[in-house]
């Protein structure tokens, strides 16, 4: 760890990992409710479990992004964070808002909009925390060295924070409501978050492979251009059936096809950098997670997204388990695995230790990735059958759900594998055996001391 203020990232990563555990356990409970629908129905209804599962996912990923920014920007800018105190205040606001949101859900208070169910005061808290973050990070970058990585990261984080404003706009017209809703949900995960992903991935590969910065930056600019070109108008694939003009069916189909390109470029970028790299970095687990993230993101967000994004196909498949298959693999590859790669790289440094428990860490990668891949295949088959029975033959929804019970049982089994992998990862990250040999690296003096 080169700069003392990077220590801020440690607490963000701890909070993110705690919520990661809550998120996967919530998902496992939700998966079992598909098998046994009356499970916890009187105590903890499915809609509450689902809100906790999805909201915990979004919050811990954001905490991971914020922590990653506080870790990498001092190194890239070659200066300390502008105000560590503001960074800790931001973390406190986010954690209080998270606890407040969960408490509200448990007593039946929520906004009712999927992913944006947070009570109004929590939304304002998130907005304040985002503004604090943008001030802190922007002042750090402006006062220090400018790089392509910090530029792309700042662009992504500024845009995702500004788009949060649409979470407050809830018009009476249902078509407008859904359009603004997608401005947050789609333009986060399929545009601005892609910029954050590309910047963090570029930083990790720069450190882990030893390739020249110029090579990394050229790839980064191309990835960013294709992500924004395809992602913004690719929002149209959510506008097919919500009452907007028919031209969105063609705009959405064409630009959604292009959305595969940035994920293919990120996967290619990762493997080419490793191939060109001259550095035998000791942290093999972080490198595995980085390569795995870009690869699974290409299949989950790119290939599985394309499977049902053309309007002629989507007419039949939207809202089925095919959507769930795409969503799970895309989030896992693009953002979950990326954050876990950053944790694997940064946590040993933040704890002033050599990379530790790497075998367990890599085992957790294969367990989680294998479980998520199997879950995706199961849900894809279930969604294909559901599409035919429900949308083609015209069977009743609940009759179709009964016919899919075997797939839901297999999905639950895959979820068990994911949860075991997640718990193994947390153990590998947080527990260091007493008999393990550790060799802290030499401290680098802070400039100006």
Image (cartoon, grey):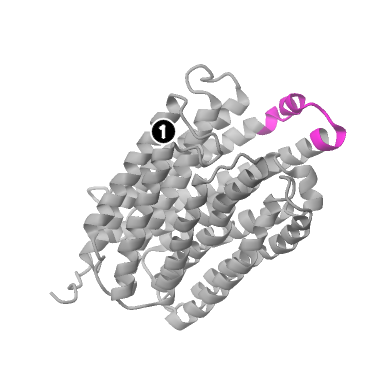
Secondary structure that dominates the magenta span: helix
Position of the C terminus, as image quadrant, is bottom left
Query: Which residue has dot 1 on it?
Result: 102
In the rendered structure, the answer to whether residue 7 lies left or right of residue 413 reads left
**One can see residue 436 in this view:** no
In the rendered structure, the answer to whether residue 56 lies left or right of residue 292 reads left
Q: Residue furthest right?
A: 393
Q: Secondary structure at mark 1?
A: helix
Q: Quadrant of residue 386?
A: top right
Numbered range of the magenta stretch: 390-407
Residue closer to the observer: 221 or 13: 221
Q: Quadrant of residue 112?
A: top right
Residue at 82% x, 33% y is 389
Residue 237 location (% of width, % of height): 70, 54
In the rendered structure, the answer to whether residue 420 lies left or right of residue 315 reads left
> Vertical placement of 267 versus 252: above or below?
below
């Amino acid at each position: 760890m080169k700069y003392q203020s990077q220590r801020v990232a440690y607490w963000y990563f701890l909070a993110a990992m705690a919520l990661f555990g809550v998120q996967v356990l919530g998902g496992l409970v939700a998966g079992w409710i598909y098998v046994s629908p009356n499970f916890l129905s009187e105590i903890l209804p499915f809609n509450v479990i689902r809100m906790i599962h999805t909201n915990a996912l979004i919050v811990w990923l954001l905490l991971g992004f914020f922590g990653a920014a506080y870790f990498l920007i001092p190194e890239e800018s070659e200066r300390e964070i502008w105000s560590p105190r503001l960074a800790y205040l931001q973390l406190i606001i986010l954690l209080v808002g998270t606890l407040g949101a969960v408490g509200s859900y448990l007593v039946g208070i929520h906004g009712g909009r999927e992913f944006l169910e947070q009570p109004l005061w929590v939304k304002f808290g998130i907005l304040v925390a985002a503004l604090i973050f943008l001030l802190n990070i922007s002042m750090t970058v402006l006062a220090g060295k400018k790089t392509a990585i910090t530029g792309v990261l700042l662009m992504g984080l500024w845009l995702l924070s500004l788009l949060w404003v649409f979470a407050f706009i809830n018009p009476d017209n249902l078509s407008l409501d859904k359009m603004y809703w997608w401005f947050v949900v789609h333009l986060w995960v399929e545009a601005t978050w892609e910029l954050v992903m590309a910047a963090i991935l570029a930083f990790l590969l720069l450190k882990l492979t030893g390739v020249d910065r110029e090579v990394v930056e050229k790839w980064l600019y191309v990835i960013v251009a294709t992500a924004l070109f395809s992602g913004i108008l690719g929002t149209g694939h959510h506008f097919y059936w919500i009452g907007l003009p028919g031209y969105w069916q063609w705009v959405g189909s064409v630009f959604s096809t292009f959305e595969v390109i940035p994920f293919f470029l990120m996967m290619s970028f990762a493997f080419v950098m490793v191939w060109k790299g001259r550095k035998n970095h000791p942290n093999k687990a972080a490198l595995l997670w980085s390569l795995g993230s870009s690869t699974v993101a290409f299949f989950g967000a790119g290939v599985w997204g394309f499977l049902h994004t053309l309007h002629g196909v989507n007419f039949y498949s939207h809202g089925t388990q095919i959507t769930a298959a795409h969503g799970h693999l895309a989030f896992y590859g693009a953002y979950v695995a990326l954050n876990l790669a950053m944790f694997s790289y940064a946590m040993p440094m933040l704890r002033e230790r050599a990379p530790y428990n790497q075998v367990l860490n890599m085992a957790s990668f294969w367990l989680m990735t294998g479980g998520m891949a199997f879950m995706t295949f199961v849900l894809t088959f279930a969604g294909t059958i559901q599409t035919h029975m429900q949308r083609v033959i015209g069977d009743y929804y609940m009759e179709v759900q009964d016919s899919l019970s075997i797939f839901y049982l297999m999905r639950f089994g895959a979820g068990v594998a994911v949860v075991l992998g997640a718990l193994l990862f947390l153990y590998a990250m947080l527990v260091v055996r007493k008999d393990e040999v550790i060799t802290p690296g030499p401290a680098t003096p802070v400039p100006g001391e």
